[in-house]
Amino acid sequence: MDNLKKDIPSAQNLEAVTGHGVKADVNGNQIVIGNQKLFKDLSPEVISQVEKLEKEGNTTMIVQRNDQVIGLIALMDVPRKEAVETLKQLRLLGIKRMIMLTGDNQQVADAVARQIGITDAWGGLLPEQKVKSIEDLTANKGKVAMVGDGVNDAPAMAKSTVGIAMGAAGSDVALETADIALMADKLDNLPFAIGLSRQSRRIIKQNLWISLGMVAVLIPLTISGIATIGPAVIGHEGSTLLVVFNGLRLLAYKEGIKKQD
């Protein structure tokens, strides 16, 4: 096995070109790796190979050394196994339009969208274009939730109504930007998080009505002398216990989800 070990030279002057690729100097040679938009004056043969690979659903990266193309790297995005079921659950929750924003080319985006049944796929987007897409959706639709995990997703999440980060696999920037972090890195936790949020909102409203309603009843009764201080205190503390027990219903909701799993 020792014979298989190779000394890999370190890269110098590394430069990341946002949304396109990277550049660096290796052993005195300039190495550039990125998508087709990063390169100029590509030969028809290289362009033809790139287009063929992308039509098959691959994300293609071109490798260039000193202005000479020396290879192609093709990667295929595979949707998470739970993606189809997650989207189904989101539709049951009333979310009818789901849009995928990706830096991959449009053909790759369409291929993935067809596999999982997503509503719209917008491909070839740079980080600033993702931000613009979120701003346009917010202006037209009012409220937009953004789910992401990378540095490129963070600006768009910051512009969305609710930013949701896939916590375990997400970058630190995405985690700090997001309003919600799914720390288990399980996509199927997204419907649970939305359902729990809605249930929490309902219970908060119920508790407000219980608390304010009891105060609205006890104050006039106490001032008018109909109720003495003793029963008033008992009524007030009873409403407090009712609010607490009502809030504990959220634990039952959580247990219900676990039983379904």
Image: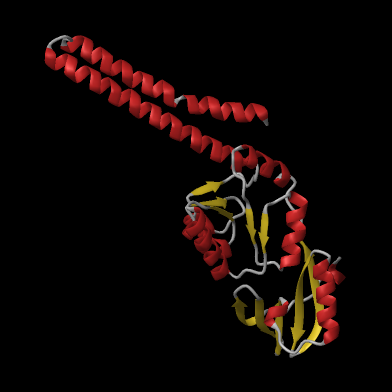
Q: Residue furthest front?
A: 140
Q: Residue 82 versus residue 181: which sits nearer the camera?
A: 82
Is residue 77 in view?
no
Q: Residue at x 73, y 45 (%)?
A: 84
Q: Residue at x 39, y 27 (%)?
A: 206
Q: Position of residue 39 (x, y in %)?
A: 71, 84
Is residue 149 in view?
yes
As displayed, is residue 119 above or below residue 39?
A: above
As displayed, is residue 239 above or below residue 195?
A: above
Q: Residue at x 34, y 23 (%)?
A: 210
Please state, as top left, top right, bottom left or bottom right, where the N terminus lies in the image. Answer: bottom right
| Left or right of residue 45, residue 136 in this image | left
Q: Residue 3 versus residue 257: which sits nearer the camera?
A: 257
| Left or right of residue 29, residue 167 in this image | left
| Left or right of residue 35, residue 146 in this image | left
Q: Position of residue 126 (x, y in %)?
A: 60, 70
Figure label count: 0
As displayed, is residue 158 above or below residue 5?
A: above
Q: Position of residue 207 (x, y in %)?
A: 37, 27
Q: Quadrant of residue 234?
A: top left
Q: Residue at x 26, y 18 (%)?
A: 236
Please state, as top left, top right, bottom left or bottom right, where the C terminus lies in the image. Answer: top right
Q: Residue 210 versus residue 175: which sits nearer the camera?
A: 210
What colour-coding does the image apply? secondary structure
Q: Position of residue 139 (x, y in %)?
A: 48, 59
